[in-house]
Amino acid sequence: MPRLLISGGPGSGCTSTARALGERLGVPVVDSDAYLHKPTDPPFQEQYTLEERRALLKPVLDPEGSWILSGSVATWGLHPLAATHGVFLKISKEVRLQRLLARQRDQFGARIEPGGDMQEEHEAFLEWAAGYEEREGAGRNLTTDRAFLTAQCARFVEVEGEATVNEIVARLEEFVGD
């Protein structure tokens, strides 16, 4: 029973890849973003505590079943995670930021534009996301995410460069099937 952890920088395609792969394999998909922020309006105002995140995830990450967990959970204290396969998606910062901007515009429209109630938060988010590759220390960054995957997962693959979701999913199907 495969249990996959798919991670990468913000905007690298973890959620899209996980959903497509889960559909192809018939495996439930869990998006870590759903367990990071409490529902608020405007969104992203309050995070779940680490204890709340772990408690919420425990029933959906069955150590005996199959699942795909997308996103960065390296600092959440999910030890052991019982993941069998780790996938790290690595694309250029420029592409990641373009995707994030498009996603933010689709989700929030004028709220992120100058004068909108989410403008400052949006700008801070993009600045934070831009530092993913260079940032060091505690928190979400390339080094921490990759190290977590290699430590938690018996099998690991890094998918680098731009490819369609279907191309990535085909590669991951082979990886899981080996």
Image (cartoon, rainbow, N blue to C red):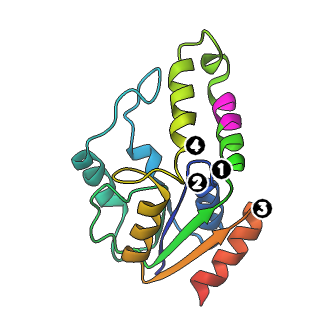
| Residue at mark 3 | 164
Q: Which of the two labelled residues, at mark 2 and mark 3, occupies the earlier sequence position?
A: 2
Determine which of the numbered discs, if any, sits on residue 130 in the image: 4
Mark 2: amino acid: Thr
Which residue lies under the disc numbered 1?
93
Disc 4 to disc 1, C-alpha distance = 7 Å
Comes first in the chain, label 4 or label 1: 1
Is label 3 in a helix, a strand or a loop?
loop
**Left or right placement of residue 114 versus residue 68 in this view:** right
Instruction: State which tag comes first along the sequence, 4 or 3.
Output: 4
Quarter holding residue 74: bottom left
Q: Are marks 4 and 1 in contact (CB under 8 Å)?
A: yes
Q: Residue at x 60, y 17 (%)?
A: 111
Quadrant placement of the C terminus? bottom right
Looking at marks 1 and 2 on the same chain, the residue that comes earlier in the sequence is marked by 2
Q: CA distance from mark 2 to mark 3?
A: 13 Å
Of tags 4 and 3, the one toward the viewer is 4
Q: Report the magenta residues as a range.
A: 101-106
Q: Are dots 2 and 3 in contact, CB under 8 Å?
A: no
Q: Which of the two marks, 1 or 3, is nearer to us in this view? A: 1
